[in-house]
Image (spheres, rainbow, N blue to C red):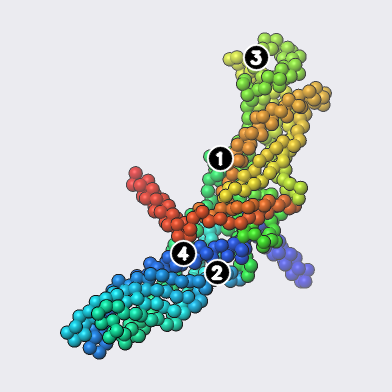
Amino acid sequence: MTSYFVHFLFLWSLSVMASAEPAGCKIRITDRGLDMLKYETQKFVEEELSNISMPEMKGEEGRFQYTITDVKITELNLTHADLQFIPDVGLLFDVQNSSISLTFNRRILYWFFYDTGNINASAEGVNINTALNLIRDEEGRLKINNITCDANISKMSAKFSGTLGRVYGFLARFLTTGMRFLLNQKICPALDHAALVLVNSLLETIPVRTEVDQFIGIDYSLIDDPVVTSRSLDMHFRGMFFDLSHQNVSLVNYAVEPVIKEYDRMVYLALSEFFFDSGLFSYYTAGVFQMHIVNEKMPKDLEMLLRTTYFGLIMMLNPALVDAPLSLQLAVNSPPKTSIKTSGATVVMTAIVNVMVLPPGQPPVQLSSLTMETKFNAKVSMRGKRLSVHADLRRFKIFSNQSALESLALIPLQAPLKTMLQMSVVPLINNWTKRGVRIPLADGVDFIEEVVEYHNGFIVIGANLHFSKGLREMVVGSSEMEQQTANSTATTSTA
């Protein structure tokens, strides 16, 4: 019985381990990054509260009849504001002992006297405590799930202007009490709308599953809820590329999961070998790693060596083929593999090279089939929001698939074939990778001062953040983008 129970626990633990999907990409935002975000958040909150609309106030107090209109917030002084992490929850935006200045118009009737004028009011001891709960939604997107808000204004004063300003001074306490109550009731709904509607609409613009180019796309969906500690916000993404023509075909992630230990910079991006392998696998399944070198693409010295090497074979096949064009057909025969060590990153690629002669008006004739083994150094870099890789050929080897004797005869071809790779194939690879792939950041936020560190099995890029747009501008831009998408969808469905 005991052995059965132990066996059951063992199988259960294996199933749990199998169900836990490793992250191919991780992003950490530290408390240093939060300090910069605090400034943008403070400006955004000030702008949101400035747009609060207050209802018209009417009433009577003794023999006074009053109407208050055109209430406007003229200034917010949120100097004592702080943004911090709440472990296992999300973010806390806290405002203490701040002030708000307002202005509104009055119309007052006292007996037979009618008076109008402007009232300047100030709210002191403004305290706002707002907690944002961050989760992963059904699409794998970061989302503000809930907001807890508490706002309180300790006191409010008003100064009357106009003909009877001094006479109405005793009304100030009565009017400001009502105004303070209304303002208290308006702050939290305004912040609720800002977070749950406006900021969430901005988060929806961050790519989750999107195209990289005409061949492949990338999946940046979160695999679990964000991990929040007192010092950081960690997000674990799938980080997997896919072939656009075979989106259900994917590589299984057996790679070492990246680990971020640092907190010194504002943001960290960690990428596992799986992140790069899935990209190479997707390009492989898309048929990108194939090349036909013929005519002007064939270097003259290489063509001459090929003719010399295979002259006897051509004469045996058909002497009339001596002057026919030669070609090389390259095709990678298995997905390339990435290896990341503390010394750097490398990519190993194996390809089949078929040497062909092309008689005019006739089918190509294969002269030989070769195996080419290559190893590239891969230098990872980051610019703005785009991650790119630059490849350099490090090692090259070619041998015959038919005989060891032919492999010896191919030794003179090693150098020119390597040169051909450096001039033709490597630039082709770098042309795909130099455009880079976007990392999951909102428009208006970029990496600067990046430092790339190589570890065994993964890469960590530490950087600081730069806001090229204010949070308000970013939110407005996301709303406009969402509206354009909706209009485009409506137009398409109508057509």
Mark 3 to mark 1: distance in Å? 34 Å
- Quadrant of the drawing holding the C terminus: top left
Mark 1 Cα-neighbour bin, 10 Å: few <14, some 14–19, many ≥20: some
Going by the numbered disc 2, the residue's amino acid type is Leu
**Label 2 sits on residue:** 83
Residue at the left extreme, as displayed: 112
What residue lies at 62% left-to-right and 60% top-to-bottom?
Answer: 266
Mark 4 to mark 2: distance in Å? 13 Å
The numbered dot on residue 215 is 1
For the residues labelled 4 and 2, say whether their Cβ atoms are less than 8 Å apart: no
Q: Earlier in the sequence, mark 4 or mark 1?
A: 4
For the residues labelled 4 and 1, say whether their Cβ atoms are less than 8 Å apart: no
The numbered dot on residue 324 is 3
What residue lies at 69% left-to-right and 56% top-to-bottom?
Answer: 257
Q: Which of marks 4 and 3 is nearer the N terminus?
A: 4
**Label 4 sits on residue:** 44
- Residue 4 vs 462, above or below: the answer is below
Asked whether, in this view, residue 197 is left or right of residue 340, the answer is left
What residue lies at 40% left-to-right and 77% top-to-bottom?
Answer: 122
Going by the numbered disc 3, the residue's amino acid type is Ala
Going by the numbered disc 1, the residue's amino acid type is Phe
